[in-house]
Image: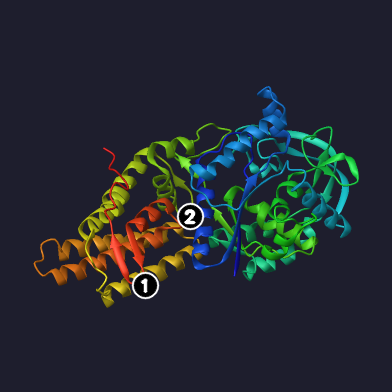
Amino acid sequence: MKFYITTSIPYVNGAPHIGFALEAIQADVLARFYRQKGDDVFFLTGVDEHGVKIARTAELAGKTPRVFTEEISGKFRDLKIALNLSWDDFIRTTDQKRHWPGAQALWKALADKGDIYKKTYKGLYCVGHEAFITEKDLKDGICADHQKAPELIEEENYFFRLSKYIGDIKLRIKNNELKILPVGKKNEVLGLIKEGVEDISFSRPKKNLSWGIPVPDDNLQTMYVWCDALANYISALGYGGSDDALFQKFWPADAHLIGKDILRFHALIWPAMLLSADLELPKALLVHGHITSGGQKMSKTIGNVVDPFEAVKQYGVDAIRYYLLREIPSGEDGDFSYEKLRERYNGDLANGLGNFAARVTTLAEKLDLSSYAVEPAIEKEIFSVREEAAKKVLEFKLHEALAKIFELVRAGDQLLNDRQPWKNSDSSQSGSDLYNLVVLLDNVAALVAPFLPETATKIQECIQWKGNKLSVKKCSGLFPRIE
């Protein structure tokens, strides 16, 4: 089985913040989960580097757009090590060898279908969104996300016949051929369709947008964000290039993991483009919420962001991964604070998993436990947690999956306290108890591996199986308590 998962490609007008870290980590959990199942996984991420906002931001920084995007894109690429991500490829929309051929091939496919036409357009343009918006998107004439009034623009653009495909898209969303999770987001999209969907602007004059991909056969126009950025999901696989073996193998995407603010683009515009180009639709859109700070959305534009590199430097990568995956409901908004992070760290990691691993391995170290067997009740409990956690992952409820796994940690702690093998004068019984506890810990490590890969590896290095021979060494200091 194959599994192709993507993140959205963040806009590089500023350094990465904790909001995208959440998305990247969630996608990483899914990629690792499916690899663990034995599937052939391709995990794609990247960056969106074109547009008016990039050009203006670069100019303010006294740099060319190319130099500016090179610097910022490097910081997004550095997240792979900082957050222990396992992505297979990183696509940049400025890559003229890998990305541009696919984006231009997609444009041509839409044009050949008769779905691109030219007309004069007058509308409100939000530089922050890099998109035309409507009055209903404003509050007191201001964009709520970027706290700025949009610009009134009139220009001749190419348009895409989005409205032509809305009926087909509606049917596919309703019957879950294009699954949208959580279900509330599916209903939101169907509500947008009910309000009415018009054709969309698909290009901008080169004089107003020079930093982008040229429209095929028209050097006076530059591709707008839709055919540029959204095409990354297929251009990275070789679509439109000389070698499309990855495209043939992995498309359609099994999951696009995106933020709720770009749901409309992925649930309406992207499927319409694919239908026009006679390409298969992605199987699922997994939609996460925003991370807030004091109830306010974190935004590079507003400036209330949390630096993921600094957070990892202070607390360690798995502590940050755990907090984001456990504290933030997968499909909803959640609040970030260092106070809550310390509470989760000490309560669940230091006093929970870390303490359990240290106690069990310290007691079992140097003992020969190979002759024992797992008690049926413990085996049943492990199987039940494994099944329930997997079910929650498939439902895109990663926070609930992680909570279920940590029930096994608490069950192990309770078993250890009840049995007290260090007090038992019967060495056979204490050996049996410790064997069961080691097996339980080993299974916890396997279950948390997609979520906390560094921690899982450390535990598994302390529990070595060679055939039927089991050896254990002390596993302490996983999560030193923070005072």
Identified at 16% across, 66% down, the residue is 419
Identified at 26% across, 64% down, the residue is 411
Please tell me how crowded label 1 is: few (under 14), some (14-19), or many (20+) other residues with Cα within 10 Å. few
Looking at the image, is mark 1 or mark 2 earlier in the sequence?
2
Identify the residue at the far right of this view.
217
Residue at image mark 2? 330
Q: Quadrant of the C terminus?
A: top left
In the depicted view, which residue is nearer to us: 341 or 293? 341
> SS of the residue at dot 2?
loop
Q: Quadrant of the N terminus?
A: bottom right
Identified at 81% across, 33% down, the residue is 208
Identified at 36% across, 68% down, the residue is 385
Note whether 171 is above or below 327 in the view shown.
below
Identify the residue at the far bottom of this view.
376
In the depicted view, which residue is nearer to us: 303 or 186? 303
In the depicted view, which residue is nearer to us: 41 or 468? 468
The answer to whether residue 143 is visible is no
**Quarter-wise, where is residue 108 in the image?**
bottom right
| Residue 449 image offset from top left, x and y in percent | 43, 58
| Residue 134 image offset from top left, x and y in percent | 70, 43
| Residue 99 image offset from top left, x and y in percent | 74, 48
Which residue type does callout 1 highlight?
Phe
Identify the residue at the far top of this view.
62
| Residue 41 image offset from top left, x and y in percent | 58, 61
| Mark carried by residue 383 | 1
Q: Mark 1 or mark 2, which is nearer to you?
A: 1
| Mark carried by residue 148 | none
Which residue type does callout 2 highlight?
Ser
Note whether 387 is above or below 153 in the view shown.
below
